[in-house]
Image (spheres, rainbow, N blue to C red):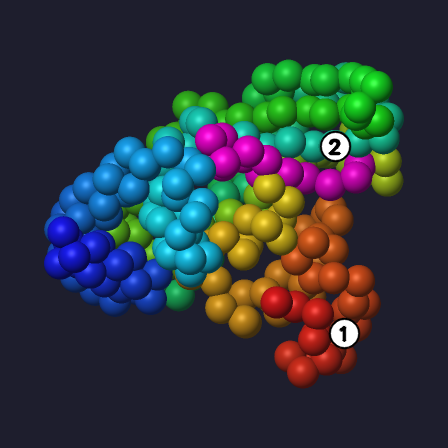
Amino acid sequence: MHCCKLLFLWTVLTLMSGCSVLGKVREATLVAGTVSWKAQPLALRQQYPQWMQSVYYTAELQTSDISQWQLYLLSRTSLGPGATKAKAELVYIADGQQQSKSFDLQLQQMEEPTATQDYFRYRYQFGAEALAFYQTYQPKRFAGQAKPLQLYYLQPLYAENQVDLTQVLRVEYALLPEYGPKTVGELMRLMFNLQKRDWIEFCQNRRYQYDKSTACGEVKITEAATADSIAAVD
């Protein structure tokens, strides 16, 4: 059993680093280890050291079903009919080139404010078109030909003036619904493959349109910002 755990951890580490080994061997080991991990109750999994939880959470993401991923948009006011016309972009790097494509998000549910929730809550999921793109990406990832999807950049996108984004509080991620919704900062801290440069790039990049203080703190990023000046980045 100990040898199996070491093999699984080695597979995840090489997968995260982009080292090249046989894709099918990688995939089989990763899937088997993830199944064994998920067989434990969630409460038990959350008692392991944080680094181990991050390894297995990342592995679960790598083998999860994209059609089950959920994005929540929390807004002070109703987004109106424009809420049904959201898109999201999937992005990864392969052969040094950015691969990206935009897909429709399907609005699954809208919750109005309640006595304990003072905001509107919109739940989105991907459709079949995104699933096909993801299934093309996965073999490349297992073969070490692509870097991980930049999941922390996932966000509902709308045409200009379609919705009032100034009223939006934040985006929350339930990419693995069993774990419940996570802020972007919580998601990033659970992803084992992220390095300091990924945090810095995310906090400096204007691509993310919503609140990212849970990942970047209240630091104001300027054009001349350096790695040393972003002390709040974890």
- Which quadrant of the view contains residue 114? top right
The amino acid sitting under disc 2 is: Leu
Residue 165 located left or right of residue 103: right
Query: 200 above or below 104?
Result: below
Crowd around label 1: few <14 · some 14–19 · many ≥20 (10 Å): few
Q: Tell me whether circle 2 and circle 1 mark residues in contact (CB < 8 Å).
A: no
Q: Where 168 sits versus 30, above or below?
A: above
Q: Residue 28 placed where, x, y %?
A: 16, 44
- Highlighted magenta segment, given as a residue range: 168-181
Residue at image mark 2 = 74
Which numbered mark, 2 or 1, is in the foreground of this view? 2
**Front-most of 212 and 10?**
10
Task: Give the side of residue 6 with respect to residue 165, left or right.
Answer: left
Which circle marks residue 223 in the picture?
1
**Residue drawn at point x = 23 percent, y = 62 percent:** 10
Q: CA distance from mark 2 to mark 1?
A: 29 Å
Where in the figure is residue 109, as x and y percent of width and height?
64, 16
Task: Check disc 1 and give the amino acid type.
Answer: Glu
Measured from the top left, where is residue 18 in percent x and y? 31, 64
Which residue corresponds to the image point at 36% horizontal and 49% vertical from the top-left?
Answer: 56
